[in-house]
C-alpha cells in the first residue's frame, strides 16, 4: 500500500532522513478501528472448507488490543487460535455445503504514540558491526538472516547495496530504505504473491510486499537480521475505500532492538503502522489460508478500512 | 573352497574376501550357529524348497505384501523372506542396544538444543548450515517444548557388521522408520515353518514391541491427561507401509485413523466415532511433517488435519515423532554424531560411525584425492543414493572426472571408506542352494519420558542380488528373522 500523497514517479534525489513528519502530538494514544471483509463465491457447491485468517492486530508494547468482532455469513463457529509462529488466528470450518461465504472482522486497538527515533545506542559504530559478526549473534538471528525463495537476490545483483561501515547500522538501513523506495516503482496488478526478486529487480516495479522482500534481502545480505511484517497502514482520517493489507520490514540492531522500516513509503514504521504478524517473508504471513474442496471457478475479494480517533 | 557333509550347505561356497557371520577365521562354524547348522542339515534341499513355498504362502495369507508398480500392471508382492535366521549373541547385542539408546538420546538432546538455545552451534561444535540449509528444520518448532521432552520417540538405527567384526552405524532414521511389523511377521513365519528349532535356542521375543510402544507413548501424554487416548494416523491404504500401520494399531489395541477421521475444535483434537466425538491425546503419526496440517504446511495436503499444529503448539496433543525431527535425520548431521554424543552425554560413542572426510577441509581433501579408489564419494546435499561414486568401481577416466568435480566445489562432497558388509548364508531360489549374501540390521528404539526400549531383534535385510550392497526392499532386498539370544 502506498500513502496517497506518495509520488508515483521517482526523481532520484538525496533524501534527508531526519525530516520524518510527526503527525500527532507526543504521548497521545490513538484508537484505531479496522474493518476487514472478504467475500468468496464458487461456481459449484463447496462440501468442505477450512480457512485461517492471520489478520488480528498483535498485542505488543505499542499496541493495546481492545476488541474483536468476527462474523461469517454461514454462522459457522469462529475459532480463535494461533499459527505455528504464535500469532493470533481465526479459523472457520462451515459444517454445511455452500456456494458463497463472506467474512467480516472489526478490530479495535489503542496505539501508543511512536517516535521511531526514540532510542539510545550505547555502542560505538565499530562495536555494533563487531557484534553482528559474532557467531552467537548469527545463530540467535539465523532465521531472519536466511535467504528464502522470496528474499534471494539474482546472482549478479547481490551487491546492489553495500553498507558503508563508517556510518551506523541505523543510518545504513535508512539509506537502504530510501534506496529501495527509489529502486522500484510502485505499481499494482503487475506482480502477485508469488513474484520473486529476479523479476522485481529486472522490471523495477511492484507493491508493498515486493519492496519489503527487496529490503529484507539487502539488509540480510549486509548481515542485519530483518523480518517481513504484515499489518495495516492508516492512511489518514476520513480516508475510505477499498484497500489491502500492508507490508513493511523490521530490522534488528544490537542494543536498539527491532525497528520498523517501510520502504514502500520511505518511512520508519510509526503510529500509523498496525502490526499483525512477522516472519521470514510473505509466506509466513499470508493473511488468509484456505483449504477448499470444490471444482470450477471461484471469485475472492477483500477490503480493508482503517480509521482513527484521538483518545480523550 | 570348503565343502561339508551337511546336505543343506553342501554346495555353499565361501569367498575368503568376505566376512561370513557363521564361520570363524579358521573356517569353523561359529559356536552359536553349530546347533542350528546341524538342525537344518538334517533336511534335504527338497524339504527346504517345500518349506520355503509354505512360508511364502503364509505371508500372502496374512496380507503382508507391498505393491510393485509396473508399466503394465500393479502387483502385490511379498517381501522375500529367508528361512535361515541370523543369530546375535548376548555380548554383541549388548553393544548394539546400548549404542542405539546412546544415539537416540544424543539425537533427542541435539534436537532440543537446536530448537532452543542452539548452544552446540554457538560453541562451534557443529556448523550453522546444519539447520539453516536443512529443508527439514521447522522454524515453527523453535521454543516448543514437546510433551515429556521427547522428539524422536521412535528411531530406526541401521547398523552393519564390517569385516573387522565391528558394528558400524549407517544411518539414524528418525522420521517415520518402518519395518518393525516385518520383524514380528518374520518370527511368526519361521515359527510356523520350523517351530522345532526354537526349542534349541533361548531367543528373546519380538512380539512385545507393540505393548512397549504403547506404554512409552503413554509416558509422553499431554499435561493434565490421566489415561491418554492413543491413535495411529496413516496416509491411507494405498501407502506402501499401510500393513504396518494397521498391524501396529491392532496390536496396540488403539484406533487406526486417517486425517478425515479427526478434527480440531478449540485447539483440542477429536476423533469422529459412532458414539460422538472422542478426544485424542497422543498421535503416532506415519505422515510426514509437510502433510500433517494443511493450514500450517502444504495447503494441498488432504492427508492431515486442519488445525493440528496449533493444538500441538498449545500442548494439547502429542505427536510422535515430533514435527521437525527430520532435521537430525540427515547425512550432514550423521557425520557429527561422535561430537554430538560427546557434547551432550560426555560419553564415547559405543557404536562406530563410518569415518567421514569433509572435502571442505584442505588436509582431508588431499587425503580424499590420493585415496579415491578406496573411498565412497557422496554429495552432501543429495538424497536417495543419487550422485554416489564408489571408488573401486570407477575406471581411470571416471576417477579423473570425479576428482575434478571435487576440486571444483570441495564443500559439496564428503568421502567415506568403502565398507564391506558381512555376509550370511541365504537360500537362492534360482540355484536352489545357499549362497553368501550381504546383510545389514535395522534396530528399533523407543524413547519415552525417563524410559526407553530397544526391540531385542531387528530387521536383517539381505541384498538378494549377488555382490549387491544395497539391501532396500525396492532394490530387490529380502529379510531374515533375527535372533537375539538370552544371556
Image: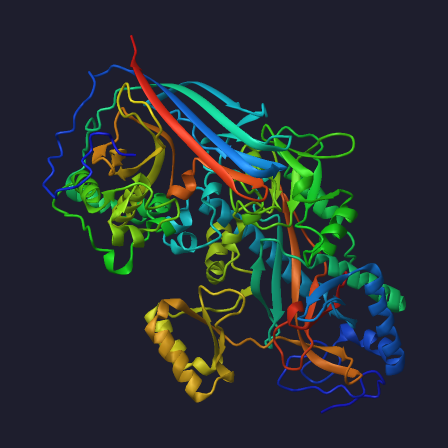
Image coordinates for residue B440, horizontal then vertical, percent: 65, 69
The one nearer the camera, B402 or A185, is A185
The one nearer the camera, B165 or B13, is B13
Where on the picture, by quarter, is residue B421?
Answer: bottom right
Toward the bottom, the furthest residue is: B1
In this view, A186 is above or below B460: above
In this view, B420 is above or below A61: below
Image coordinates for residue B119, horizontal then vertical, percent: 40, 46
Please give the name of the residue rendered at 44% of the width and 63% of the height, measured from the top-left corner: B381
The one nearer the camera, A278 or B460, is A278
Q: Which colour style is shown?
A: rainbow
Say if residue B138 shows up in the picture. Answer: yes
Toward the top, the furthest residue is: A312
Left or right position of B132 against A224: right
Please give the name of the residue rendered at 18% of the width and 33% of the height, measured from the top-left corner: A122
Say if residue B126 shows up in the picture. Answer: no
Split into 4 quadrants, where in the image is the N terminus of chain A? top left
Split into 4 quadrants, where in the image is the C terminus of chain A? top left
Marker count (numbered): 0
Please give the name of the residue rendered at 79% of the width and 57% of the height, measured from the top-left corner: B205
In this view, A99 is above or below B474: above
Image coordinates for residue B463, horizontal then vertical, percent: 67, 74
Left or right position of B201 against B473: right
Where on the picture, by quarter, is residue B482?
Answer: bottom right
Toward the front, the furthest residue is: A43
Image coordinates for residue B389, horizontal then vertical, percent: 48, 77
Amino acid at each position: 500500500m502506498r500513502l496517497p500523497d506518495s509520488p508515483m514517479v521517482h526523481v532520484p534525489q538525496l533524501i534527508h532522513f531526519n525530516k520524518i513528519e510527526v503527525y500527532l502530538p507526543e504521548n497521545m494514544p490513538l484508537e484505531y478501528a479496522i474493518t476487514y471483509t472478504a467475500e468468496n463465491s464458487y461456481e459449484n457447491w463447496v462440501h468442505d472448507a477450512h480457512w485461517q485468517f492471520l489478520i488480528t492486530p498483535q498485542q505488543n508494547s505499542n499496541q493495546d488490543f481492545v476488541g474483536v468482532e468476527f462474523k461469517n455469513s454461514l454462522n459457522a463457529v469462529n475459532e480463535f487460535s494461533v499459527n505455528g509462529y504464535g500469532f493470533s488466528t481465526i479459523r472457520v470450518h462451515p459444517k454445511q455445503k455452500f456456494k458463497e461465504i463472506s467474512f467480516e472482522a472489526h478490530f479495535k486497538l489503542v496505539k501508543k504514540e511512536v517516535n521511531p527515533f526514540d532510542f539510545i545506542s550505547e555502542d560505538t559504530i565499530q562495536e555494533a558491526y563487531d557484534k553482528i559478526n559474532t557467531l552467537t549473534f548469527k545463530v540467535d538471528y539465523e532465521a531472519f538472516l536466511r535467504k528464502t525463495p522470496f528474499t534471494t537476490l539474482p546472482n549478479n545483483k547481490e551487491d546492489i547495496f553495500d553498507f558503508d561501515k563508517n556510518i551506523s547500522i541505523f543510518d545504513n538501513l535508512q539509506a537502504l530504505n530510501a534506496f529501495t523506495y527509489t529502486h522500484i516503482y510502485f505499481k499494482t496488478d503487475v506482480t502477485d504473491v508469488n513474484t520473486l526478486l529476479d523479476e522485481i529487480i529486472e522490471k523495477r516495479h511492484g507493491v508493498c510486499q515486493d519492496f519489503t522482500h527487496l529490503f529484507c534481502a539487502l539488509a540480510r545480505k549486509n548481515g542485519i537480521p530483518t523480518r517481513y511484517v504484515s499489518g495495516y497502514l492508516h492512511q489518514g482520517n476520513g480516508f475510505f475505500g477499498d484497500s489491502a493489507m500492508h507490508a513493511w520490514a523490521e530490522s534488528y540492531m544490537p542494543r536498539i532492538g527491532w525497528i520498523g522500516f517501510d520502504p514502500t513509503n520511505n518511512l520508519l514504521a510509526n503510529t500509523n503502522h498496525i502490526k499483525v504478524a512477522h516472519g521470514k517473508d510473505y509466506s509466513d504471513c499470508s493473511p488468509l489460508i484456505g483449504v477448499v474442496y470444490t471444482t470450477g471457478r471461484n471469485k475472492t475479494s477483500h477490503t480493508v478500512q482503517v480509521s482513527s480517533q484521538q483518545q480523550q | 573352497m570348503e565343502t561339508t557333509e551337511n546336505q543343506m550347505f553342501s554346495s555353499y561356497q565361501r569367498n575368503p574376501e568376505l566376512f561370513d557371520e557363521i564361520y570363524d577365521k579358521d573356517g569353523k562354524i561359529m559356536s552359536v550357529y553349530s546347533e542350528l547348522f546341524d538342525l537344518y542339515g538334517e533336511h534335504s534341499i527338497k524339504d527346504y524348497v517345500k518349506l520355503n513355498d509354505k512360508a511364502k504362502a503364509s505371508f500372502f495369507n496374512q496380507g503382508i505384501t507391498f505393491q510393485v508398480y509396473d508399466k503394465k500392471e500393479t502387483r502385490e508382492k511379498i517381501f522375500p523372506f529367508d528361512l535361515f535366521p541370523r543369530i546375535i549373541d548376548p555380548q554383541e547385542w549388548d553393544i548394539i542396544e546400548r549404542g542405539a539408546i546412546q544415539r537416540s538420546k544424543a539425537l533427542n538432546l541435539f534436537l532440543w538444543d537446536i530448537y532452543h538455545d542452539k548452544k552446540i552451534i554457538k560453541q562451534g561444535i557443529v556448523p550453522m548450515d546444519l539447520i539453516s540449509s536443512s529443508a527439514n528444520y521447522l522454524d515453527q518448532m523453535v521454543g516448543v517444548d514437546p510433551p515429556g521432552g521427547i522428539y524422536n520417540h521412535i528411531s530406526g538405527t541401521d547398523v552393519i557388521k564390517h569385516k573387522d567384526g565391528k558394528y558400524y552405524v549407517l544411518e539414524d532414521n528418525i522420521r517415520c522408520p518402518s519395518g518393525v511389523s516385518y520383524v514380528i511377521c518374520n518370527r511368526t513365519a519361521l515359527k510356523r515353518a520350523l517351530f522345532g528349532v526354537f526349542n534349541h535356542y533361548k531367543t528373546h521375543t519380538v512380539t512385545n514391541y507393540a505393548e512397549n510402544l504403547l506404554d512409552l507413548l503413554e509416558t509422553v501424554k499431554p499435561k493434565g491427561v490421566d489415561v491418554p487416548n492413543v491413535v495411529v494416523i496413516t496416509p491411507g491404504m494405498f501407502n506402501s507401509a499401510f500393513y504396518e500401520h494397521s498391524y501396529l494399531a491392532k496390536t496396540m489395541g488403539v484406533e487406526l485413523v486417517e486425517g478425515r477421521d479427526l478434527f480440531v475444535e478449540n485447539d483440542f483434537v477429536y476423533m469422529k466415532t459412532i458414539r460422538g466425538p472422542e478426544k485424542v491425546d497422543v498421535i503416532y503419526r506415519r505422515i510426514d511433517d509437510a502433510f500433517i496440517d494443511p493450514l500450517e504446511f502444504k495447503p494441498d495436503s488432504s492427508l492431515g488435519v486442519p488445525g493440528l499444529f496449533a493444538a500441538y503448539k498449545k500442548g494439547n496433543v502429542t505427536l510422535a515423532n515430533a514435527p521437525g525431527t527430520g532435521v537430525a535425520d540427515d547425512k550432514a548431521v550423521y557425520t557429527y554424531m561422535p561430537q554430538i554424543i560427546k557434547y551432550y552425554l560426555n560419553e564415547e560413542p559405543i557404536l562406530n560411525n563410518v569415518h567421514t572426510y569433509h572435502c571442505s577441509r584442505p588436509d582431508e581433501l588431499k587425503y580424499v584425492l590420493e585415496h579415491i579408489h578406496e573411498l565412497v564419494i557422496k554429495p552432501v546435499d543429495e538424497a536417495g543414493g543419487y550422485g554416489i561414486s564408489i571408488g573401486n568401481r570407477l575406471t581411470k577416466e571416471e576417477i579423473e572426472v570425479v576428482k575434478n568435480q571435487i576440486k571444483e566445489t570441495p564443500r559439496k562432497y564428503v568421502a567415506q571408506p568403502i565398507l564391506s558388509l558381512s555376509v550370511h548364508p541365504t537360500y537362492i531360489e534360482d540355484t536352489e542352494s545357499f549362497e553368501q549374501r550381504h546383510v545389514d540390521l535395522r534396530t528399533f528404539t523407543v524413547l519415552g519420558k525417563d524410559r526407553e526400549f530397544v526391540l531385542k531383534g531387528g530387521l536383517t535385510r539381505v541384498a538378494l542380488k549377488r555382490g549387491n550392497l544395497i539391501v532396500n526392499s525396492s532394490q530387490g532386498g529380502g529379510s531374515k528373522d533375527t535372533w537375539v539370544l538370552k544371556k
